[in-house]
Every structure is written in structure tokens, then in C-alpha cells.
Image (cartoon, rainbow, N blue to C red):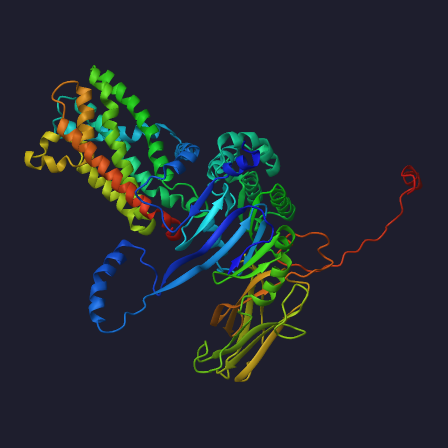
Amino acid sequence: MISSDSLRANAVSTSIIRSSNSAWTLGWADLERHRELLYFLTWRDIKVRYKQTALGVAWAILQPLAVALALAAFLGRVVHMTSDDLPYPVFAYAGMVLWQLFAQGVTESSNSIVNNERLISKVYFPRLLVPLSAILASQLDFAISLLVLVLFLIYFRITPTGAVALFPLFVLPVVLSSLGAGLWLSALNVKFRDVRYTINFLVQFWFFATPVAYPISSVPERWRMLYELNPMVGALQGFRWALRGQGAFPAQSVILAFFTGTALLLTGLYYFRRTEDTFADFI
Amino acid sequence: MRTSSDSGGPIAIRCDGIGKRYRIGLRPRYRTLRETISGMVRAPLRAMARRGHKPANDERDLWALRDLSLEVRRGEVLGVIGRNASGKSTLLKILSRITKPTEGQAEIHGRVGSLLEVGAGFHPELTGRENIFLNGAVLGMIRREIERKFDEIVEFAECGRLLDTPIKHYSSGMYVRLAFAVAAHLETEILLVDEVLAVGDAAFQKKCLGKIGDAASQGRTVLFVSHNMLAVDSLCTRAICLHEGRVVLEGLPAAVTSRYSQNWLPAFKEVVHDDIESAPGNDMIRLHRARVRPLDGSPTDQLTVRTSLAVEFECWKLAAHSRLDLAAEIFNEHGVSVFATAENRESPAPAGLLRSSFIVPADLMNNGTYRLHFMVFLNGVGATVVADWEDLLVFEIHDAASELRGAFHGQWPGALRPNLLWQTELLEPLPVSVAGLRGNG
């Protein structure tokens, strides 16, 4: 027989507070307990983003569209950039959709911890939720801008093949690496406010190292391997391959993208977990 | 020093030798990447230059908490008092897991809800309704719990009409009420509360105090950090006092608060500089002594809302022919300027050691911590500032029982607390017909 008293005593959770957590674990139980907070933080980020803007969610489409059109006008029409069997506007917009997912994810998550300073210094919850919610919130913009990609395909009479079903496979490395970079930068941002100013520059630099505006064929063969260490290369290559529905599957770059994306995420997680205990002291 | 209560309930919180160290550099801590990198480059060079000498102590350790052991039993309401920077907030931050202890460990039995700030996570662009859900989630409530208590929260906050308005349009009082309403409905076994009662109007404060009292009567454990001695006295079952990161007093609330008031006051009631050469100032005027003391009685007596204060300055006036006017401005703990006062001389005072003073009448100041800003003007107030000392004195004016309060136990509102005389007189008796209706009128 178990008395109701002892049952109640068992129900009381016990937690131990010590000088440091293990950076090698995720703190999964804690994340699980706060999963509703992840939902609310994501929902807040989405809700707040376009409040008091005249165009609202249309910005999600306008940003990649404007850059893609500018690229199409200058690089497509004027410079006659080649574009791997896709009409240049489709090529550029498809690239921008995926790029925007990455760039927005990195930027938003990098600033997320510092932007939530009051929350971090006054309430406890798993700090991972903050950059995570920033990444999740940027998925919505991505979904909306994908719809416009469908319109592009219809306009240019491109019939996708079954390969389109592999889309998520190419989105995954983008999410992994933006979260990884976001974790690194958000944790560094707490100690070094310089990071805030470095992010724009870093994202711009990354843009040029990613075949958004130009095809990968214009990268010299001997630099290719180094170039493909950028996880965005494989992601874009695979994404466009699925759109084209023909040609060889860019296996090497896709595998490398997964590899480097995962590496970025794991090191990011480790650094974040190692430093998160001190966020409230430094922020 | 281990503190524990005699009552034999199960333990809710146990701290074992908790310490928290902050590193305070003599220079500002490395904050930017450039400084860190240049610091890293310079460090070995400096080490080489210093070889053979003892390493210079560039960094000073500041222990916000040191070797703190503590037991709180289930159902206790523990008041934590102490001066600013005595480690109270650090203790709450450690127990609510916002920051980690440097040494020692704490054991917590039960779900913890911490109210270190009302409205943590509130977003101005979101509506009242949305913020209730967001804030609830931030404080650790689950959605079903919030939905269940939603009506109660709205009623407590008295904000029903504005529920779907973004809270940036709320008045500050409304904002605080909504924030506290959400927090007050946290149903965790352990509640950590920090000074949240310092906000809101008196009626609402009373309501909040009542809510904490309720929590305690339901057998929940409360850790209550406050500057409000009266609230600690009336709400808590036990109190501790922290000083420089250690527990210095422990026991029944009334005993702890009164001993705290006598022994652990802010120490800036008086500053003295004996050497005319090194005293702060310049070649016109140098400061010898400044102090606040009770007008009557011994200078070491407590300052309360019922005592008249004498504020004295002794200065060496070095410039014989300059007209110097002294001025003082008093700020309360919220940074509000309570009053300013200045000398207005007709002619220059002679050179030499001068004493200037003014008196603040009794029954004028509210209780609280005050900071005195001292200034010296050349050729009239508002003209050239010759000397300017911020926070020259920091002193506490304590609450005292007075007829003014009646049965009210909360913080008395207002920057000032004059004891004004109320008079009520009968203008005319009620007409006979009305008086008759009341029966025995």
C-alpha cells in the first residue's frame, strides 16, 4: 500500500543547482517541459515582426523578389550570366528564397539573446529556446515566398518532376547551418557587442560565397571542394536540381552540406551550452 | 552559519555553502572584441615585463554571496532583507536558476515560480490578452492553466475593457496591474518574490500583499525579498538579513527587522576629511565634513519619519572675496528629486572653516533611502558651479508608528509624507424627516 501522502511527496520535483551544467548534453527534459514556451516565443516573433508595417506579410515575398529581379535585370539581361538550364529569373529567385531563409535565420537568431535581455536576466527557461524560436519564425516567411516560386514555375512553364519531393532534404542543411551559426553568434554577442555589427558583414560575405546570383560552374574546378564546404552550396545545388528535374544529382555537394551543416550546429550547441550559464551575468 | 526553522515540515529549499563571484576589473571589463584581442596580445608582453615581480592584481574579485547555507521548510514565508548589493537579488537569481553559483549547491523540492520583475516578457505591440498568454508561458504556466485562470486574471487586473488593445497604449498603472495579475496566479509550490510590491498604487499593493499571504496560507513556500520592513513583519514567518553576501541575522521577522534597522544602515550619514590638503574640492573651497543627524538626541540615533533632521556641511573656504552659495538636492530611491535648497548670501562669507546647516522638519519626509547631491555656486545659485558632489551622503529614513497610518501596513505612497491635520466639523444636522427615517439617528 502506498499512502496518498507518500504519493504527493513523490510528485514534488527536486532540482539541484550547481556551479555548471554539462555542455555535452542538451538538457532535453528541460526543453520538453518548456515546449509551450517555444511555441509562444515563435508566435510572438511572427506576430510582432510585421506589426505596424503597411505591407505586412508581403515583405516576406518582397525581399527575395526585389533582389531576384535586380539580379535578373543586371546579371541576367546586362551581363548574360549563365544559369544552368533554368531561366535566369527562376534561377535567381529559387536561390534567393533559400538564401533568405538562411540569412534571416542567422541574423534574427544572432541578435535574439541580446534582444531578449530583460527576459534572460529576470526569468529562467532553457536559453536554447530563444534562438530556436527566431529560426522557427523565419520558416513562415520561407513558406510564403515558396508560394511565389510556384507562380514563377507556372509563368515560365516549368513542370517539376518527382524530384521536387526531395525539397525538404535541401532545406534541412540550410536550417541546420543557420541555427548553428545563430547559436555561435548569439552566445558571442552576449560577451562581445561587436558581433552585432559583424553580422551584416558576415552575411554579405556569405552571400558572395554562395551561388545565388551565379552558377557553380563559374567556380574553378580546383577551388570547388573548398567552396562546397559552405553548406549553402549543396543546399542550393540540390534545390535547383530538383526544380530542373534533369542532370546529375549533385551528390558531393549535398553530402558535404549535410556534413558541414551538422558540424556547425553541433559546435554551436556545445559553445552555447557552455556559455549560457553566464548570459545573465554579462548581458 | 546555517539557519533553519524549528518547525519540522519537509524541506523546500536547502542551500549549502553557496557563493557567487563576480570579477570586477579595476578597469572596465573586456567588452569589445578589439579590447580582448589587444588584451591577449599585450598580456604576454606585460607578463615578460613583470617577470620577477609579483603579478599585479588587475582583477578584484567581488563575492556577491559567500558561504551561504540556508534551509527553508515547506509552508514558510521567509523574508530576506539587507542593504542594496548585500546579495539578496543574487540569491534569488541563483535559486530561480537565472545564474549559476560559483561554489556550493542548492536543492529545491518543488516547482519554482520566480517574480523578479513584473511583466517579464511583455511585448508592447501585443494586446493584453496576448501578453497574458505570453507572460504566463514565460513564468512556466502551461496553456491550459492560463486558459483556466484567464477570467480571474483579467478581473484581478481590472483591465477587461482594454483586453484587445496593444499594451503600449496602457497607462503605467494598468501595465503593472496586468503584469502582477498574471504572476499572482502562478501556482507553483515555491514562490520567489523580489520587490515587486514597490510598484503600483497603495490599494493595489494591499491586494498584492494579500495574494502573497494567500499563497502562504495554502501551504506554499515563499521567499520574499523586500525593503519594506512592515511588509516583512506582517507577512513572513521568519526573516534573514544579508550583509556583504552572508547571513548576519536570522530569526523572527520583528526581531530581525528591528536589529537590521539599528545595525546595518547605509553608512554615509557622515563623511569627514581631516586633511585640508587632500580633502575634496579646489582652491576656492574644500569639504571638511558633511552629515545628517537627528536634530534632537544623539547623532547615532535612527532617523525616522518622526525626527527632524539637521543637515550640516563644514567647509574650508579658501577664497576670501568670492561669494559662494551652498546648495543641496535630495533624491529618493526612485531617483526622484524630492526637494532642493540653497543658500542665498548677500555678501561673501569670510575665509576659514565654516559650518552651514539647514533643518528638515519632522513629519515631512517619507521613509526610504535618500541621496544628497551637494553643490557650490559662485556668484549666486544657477551661475558657475564651483564644486559638485553627487551622492555625498546616503541615508535612510525609517518608518515609525504614527497616527497617520492607522491600520494600513503597506508602503505609504508619495514622495513626501507630511502629517497634515484633518479637520471635520458639523455644518448642519440632518433634517428631522431624514433623521427620523434612520430610526435611532
Count all numbered tags in the image, as a single digit.
0
Q: Up-down: is B234 above or below A173?
A: below
Q: Which residue is drawn at 55% across and 38% down?
A: B187
Residue B166 spot, x, y in % from top left: 50, 35
Residue at 56% x, 34% y is A3
The percent coordinates of residue A59 (x first, y second) are: 34, 30
From this viewpoint, which residue is outermost toward the front? A1
B422 on left or right of B237: right
Q: Which residue is drawn at 59% across and 45% down?
A: B75
Position of residue B239 relative to residue A87, above or below, is below
Judge by depth and name the residue closer to the eye, A124 or B253.
Answer: B253
From the viewer's side, name the closer residue of A13 and B144: A13
Report the side of B380 relative to A173 (left or right): right
In the picture provided, is B351 more to the left or to the right than B434? left
Tell me, yes or no, if residue A34 can be seen here: no
Is residue A170 visible in this depiction of the protein? yes
Please determine whether, in this image, residue B139 is positioned above or below residue A280.
Answer: above
Q: Nearer the viewer, residue B376 or B197?
A: B197
Q: Where is residue A34 in the image (x, y as percent from the top left)?
A: 42, 36
Quadrant location of the N terminus of chain A?
Answer: top right
For residue B266, side relative to residue A177 (left or right): right
Residue A154 locus on image (x, y percent) = 24, 16
Residue in front for this viewpoint, B154 or B257: B257
